[in-house]
Image: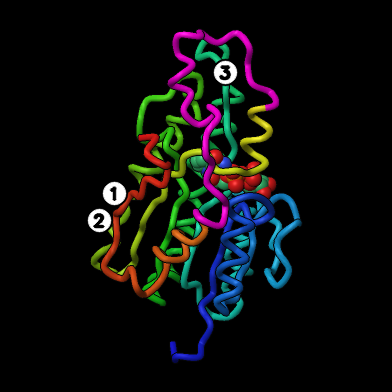
Amino acid sequence: MTESTPRVVVVTGAASGIGYATAELFRDEGAIVFGLDIAPTVPDGVTYVECNVSERGSVDAAIELCAQHGRIDVLANVAGIVQFGRFEQIEDAEWDRVHAVDLKGPFMLMQAALPHLKACKGNIVNVSSVAGNVSQPYSLAYAAAKGGLTMMTKSLALELTPVGVRVNAICPGTVDTPLVTAVANNFPTDLDPRLADRLMGFLPGPSITPAEIGSAIVYLASPAARMITGAVLAFDAGMS
Ligand SMILES: NC(=O)c1ccc[n+]([C@@H]2O[C@H](COP(=O)([O-])OP(=O)(O)OC[C@H]3O[C@@H](n4cnc5c(N)ncnc54)[C@H](O)[C@@H]3O)[C@@H](O)[C@H]2O)c1
């Protein structure tokens, strides 16, 4: 890559919230940005690629399209869905849906993009969650998926160090996005009040902006972070 060759960056979940802000930031620094999502509302200047991250065929086709410039330098796995409710009420379909999007999705994207990342000595940034780092009640399927994503990041970072591909994760606390608004508006009412103070993400308090998380993703993906791999950055205002 010469000084003037723009990096090719793939951002999943680019139609909303953290992914949208991240795609904008990469675009503004001159990268060629592909926004993968099931919804088309990616920022201007970002190429929308329809992709359901929970389906192998959709992921493979999307990555092939993103590699049209002969390279993929950065993969930011941001797409995700949340789950809230009592443990006893989690149905198989909900467990499977959360794990398909939040855990298997990043797995399949990393596998599909890896040949291109290896060729460019590129890197991956996964958006996990504070819920994957510390105990949080009433979000067991989500916590298990995000805990898996955090651990997958660390293990893959080690495995890919010899081939020069870095893998890092960010674990946000409460970020002001439509996902959080949707959860707050549909919050279960039958939860144990003794655990209220453990519902960290949804207590009133200062929230993080999507662009703040996006900036951290851009940093971890940058040459300035060339010696950082296997890092799990808690970006949670002290929650964890
Ligand atoms: N907002 C928070 O407080 C918070 C905290 C911790 C972690 N996170 C994580 O950050 C990531 C982004 O969350 P957000 O708050 O920006 O949410 P959001 O709902 O605003 O955006 C999520 C995006 O992912 C897309 N998406 C959902 N399912 C998809 C699928 N199957 N295939 C492709 N795209 C799909 C949605 O269409 C949407 O554009 C998620 O992984 C979430 O778990 C968010």
Whether residue 55 appears in this view of the structure is no
Q: What's the residue at 30%, 49% (across, down)? A: 154
- Distance from disc 1 to disc 3, alpha carbons, whole Å, reads 30 Å
Residue 135 locus on image (x, y percent): 37, 25
Tell me which image quadrant ligand 1 sits in: top right
Q: Nearer the viewer, mark 3 or mark 2?
A: 3
SS at circle 2: helix
Q: CA distance from mark 3 to mark 2?
A: 35 Å
What secondary structure is marked by label 3?
loop
- Circles 1 and 2, Cβ within 8 Å, touching? The answer is yes
- Check the image and report above or below for 177 versus 240: below
- Disc nearest the viewer among 1 and 3: 3
Residue that label 3 marks: 85
**Residue shown at the point (50%, 31%) measured from the top left:** 201
Alpha-carbon neighbours of circle 3 within 10 Å: few (<14), some, or many (≥20)? some
Residue beneath disc 1: 155
Which residues make up the magenta segment? 185-213
Instruction: Give the vertical position of 202 relative to 2 (above or below).
Output: above
Q: Is mark 1 within 8 Å of ligand 1?
A: no
Of the residues shown, which amino acid type is indicated by label 2? Leu
Give the x, y percent position of residue 109.
51, 55
Say whether disc 1 or disc 3 marks the residue closer to the N-terminus: 3
Callout 1: 10 Å neighbours few (<14), some, many (20+)?
few
In the rendered image, residue 67, in percent from the top left (x then y), is placed at 57, 73
Q: Quadrant of residue 47?
A: bottom right
Please name the amino acid that badge 1 sits on: Ser
Which of the two residues, 191 or 109, is positioned nearer the viewer here? 191
